Image: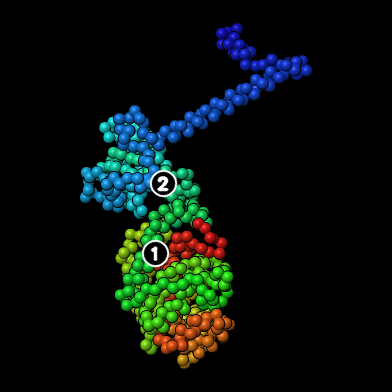
Amino acid sequence: MSDAGMAENVQSLSLEEPKVPSEGRSEAEKAAKKAAKAAAKAQKEAEKAAKAASRGQKQASVTEADPNDPLASQYGDVELVQSQTISGNVWTKVEKLDPSIEGTTVLVRARVQTVRGKGKSAFLVLRQELATVQAVLFVDDNTVSKGMVKYASAITRESVVDVTGVVVRPLAPVEGCSQSEVELKVTAIRCVARAGPLPFEIADAARGAEAISKATEAGEQVVTVLQDTRLDNRIIDLRTPANHSIFRVQSAVTQLFREFLLKEDFVEIHTPKLLGGASEGGASVFKLDYMGQPACLAQSPQFYKQMAICSDLPRVFEVGPVFRAENSYTHRHLCEFTGLDMEMTINESYHEVLDVVDRLFHTMFEGLNERCAWELTTINSQYPFAPLKFLPKAPRLEFAEGIKMLQEAGYDVDPFGDLNTELERVLGKIVAEKYNTDFYILHRYPSAIRPFYTMPCKDDERYSCSYDIFIRGEEIISGAQRIHDPSLLERRAKECGIPVETIQAYVDSFKYGAWPHGGIGVGMERVVMLFCGLDNVRKTSMFPRDPKRLAP
């Protein structure tokens, strides 16, 4: 037999246990074998536990600098910030990094958007708000060590870091970064707050419809983040560039609203949101117990705006929460939203209000295009939309005229009924084709479909001195001349089934000489949604409240 054959045979003999019939074994032998198996299993478990502990120690050690590293002072996790010191350090905003400060050493605090370690180098993309910049580390043993690269490469995505580095020009523009003409040559990096496992990747949540479509056509699989997942983890979802931009646009909407009205001599007021009765009548109110008294959340600041007018404040406005207990699951309804409300005295006609509103929104639209150009471009990159078309003076169509346009287009429409969502969109398209605008006014609505406090038209009480205003075929504004005569107000309340005693304080406010007046109520989230051409109002509500969502 050859040496190899002999060895194979010996190995076989040494590894294989002789097969002895079980009935031929003693009880002691059986017990010994069982104990041996248990011992072997215990040893394996101990080895696994030791390896796991070793991995944990290895992972834990990467949060600290190697004590034997001469550059140990340049990296490692910082002590928890508890307002224990004021260092005098100056942090530079990422958006300020450009070639004009080339060669300057800066300190920035940002999130780690991506990190890629490769041998003796590491590349990080740092994100601060909407600005991104690439940070690079190359081992040279003078400013960057192997331990430093290892530490940087192990930082989890979305962690907050302090990075010190020199602003340098890259050999070629850095694709995918807003600060593409510069990068940071890192000399120090410290983690301020580490991010745990993410519910989804920011890149997946930020992927646009066009990118998804191209990937699908190419047969590639891409991850899409559904709306409920986004809203359940809204804090992460809001970090995407498009979402950041949406809420900057929203901020600009309220700023422009305030700026315009203040220049027009309006006074900002703040009205109660806890009421003893329904603010607009009907059942869609959130009822609650108020110290043993029945109460509800305000559906509108309407009554109090009018009371302010009666208190001789001729022009008032408010930006505040509005609550509607509507069991609606549409793309444009919320149970809580931010109302932009204004009220003003008129001398002769509600068209005086419309004149102000027309100028207000023309100014707002121009202001958004001017102030938010970058944000609108960012939103458009994920949610493509056509720029809003609007005219210096919006078309004003009577409700009956709008009905006629729909009928001529082949739609069977009730001339005294309200327009549903589909008909509003159709009318919006007809108006856009005829007048080349996405923004228009429809007025003289039927009295039967307006609130009880709406002033009826003098020439035909079937119609009212009311109006709605539309963007891209969807209503964003509702308003009217209000009834300022107490006897007419009581009659209309009774006709609408509202117990007068529940609104007595409101009615009484008109008994001491009331100015003729009118106003509007605007849904802020709808304005942003439609200006940006978005498909769901939940995208423009930071933490939306609908019939099924009360958290986060």
Disc 2 residue crowd, few under 14, some 14–19, many 20+, Cα 10 Å: many
Q: Position of residue 199 (x, y in %)?
A: 49, 48
From the viewer's side, name the closer residue of 24 and 64.
64
Q: Residue 481: which quarter of the image? A: bottom left
For the residue carrying disc 1, how many other residues have a C-alpha within 10 Å: few (<14), some (14-19), or many (20+)?
Answer: some
Q: Residue at x 41, y 83 (%)?
A: 310
**Amino acid type at mark 1:** Gln
Residue farthest front in this picture: 291
The one of 523 and 120 positioned closer to us in this rendering: 523
Question: Which residue sits at x=51%, y=55%?
Answer: 232
* Picture residue at 51% right of the left edge, 63% below the top: 545
Secondary structure under tag 1 reads helix
Camera sees residue 504: yes
Q: Residue 319 in the image: x percent, y percent?
A: 41, 70
Location of mark 1 (residue): 250
Residue 413 at least partly seen: no
Instruction: Work out whether 204 lies above or below 412.
Output: above
Q: From what the image shows, is residue 259 above or below residue 114?
A: below
> Which numbered circle lies on residue 435?
none
Residue at 65% x, 20% y is 36
Q: Amino acid at mark 2?
A: Glu
**Residue at mark 2:** 158
Instruction: Indicate left or right for 497 with 120 as reference.
Output: right
- Residue at the far right in the pictured view: 23
Where is 445 relative to 287, above or below? below
> Which residue sits furthest bottom?
459
Q: Is residue 374 left or right of residue 20?
A: left
For the N terminus, give its image quadrant: top right
361 on left or right of 406: left
Q: Nearer the viewer, residue 194 or 278?
A: 278
